[in-house]
Amino acid sequence: MRMGTSTEAVPRIGVVLAGGRSSRMGRDKALLSWQGRPLLEHQLDTLHATGVDTVRVSGDRPAYGGIADPVAGVGPLGGLAGIAAACGDAELLIVPVDMPRLQPALLQRLLHAATAAGSTHFEGHVLPMRLRLDEHCRSALAALMDGSDERARSLRALQQRVGASSLPLNAAEEAQLIDCNTEQTWREACR
């Protein structure tokens, strides 16, 4: 069931966070080759396979219709601020570009989880997550972006402000959430 008002469903938008500097990797993670094509394209296809209505790329990626962060260098929260400015109310299904093992079935659990919380994620992980983009979420994003404490500009802080629920993971599902931030974790994911 789609979340929205009692009379109207909101669109479900898949979002790939691909605006980071990839500083720990030392090269652009979105363009790493995964199964013969850029990792960004793989993540877009994974989101399409979950049944979202459309997909968007967060980050200055003109070749993919990417939405540049309105404030550079503030991490994933800045990316979501760009998405929020470009989209109307929606249910966002957000994945990082650097989780190549994600499978559509796992993401469908997030997409279809019955919860009243403003965000849903898996236990022990901030991403991937489902986020209800509405007036409350936009206010929370604005407050976090305008705050003077740069450390408070985090996805976890956003989840706390909008309310969060978490879903359990089994061992096979947990293995899908390997986050490839370094060459070492990338090599592990490619095994």
Image (cartoon, rainbow, N blue to C red):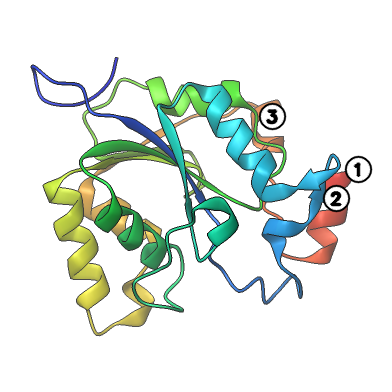
Picture coordinates of residue 60 (x, y %)?
51, 66
In the picture provided, is 12 more to the left or to the right than 31?
left
**Numbered tag placed on residue 191 in the rendering:** 1
In the picture provided, is 148 more to the left or to the right than 74?
left
Q: Give, as a three-letter code, the residue at label 2.
A: Glu
Q: Residue at x 49, y 53 (%)?
A: 65
Q: Residue at x 18, y 69 (%)?
A: 143
Picture coordinates of residue 102 (x, y %)?
65, 35
Give the SS element for disc 3. helix
Q: Would you name the residue on which mark 3 appears?
A: 171
Picture coordinates of residue 156 (x, y %)?
38, 57
In the picture provided, is 61 more to the left or to the right than 166?
right
Rounded to the nearest angstrom, the CA distance separating label 1 from label 3 is: 17 Å
Q: Would you name the residue on which mark 2 appears?
A: 188
Q: Marks 3 and 2: in contact by CB < 8 Å?
A: no
- Asked if 41 appears above or below 50 in the picture, the reply is below
Q: Marks 2 and 1: in contact by CB < 8 Å?
A: yes
Q: Give, as a three-letter code, the residue at label 3.
A: Ala
Q: How many neighbours does mark 2 have within 10 angstroms: few (below 14), some (14-19), or many (20 or more)?
A: few
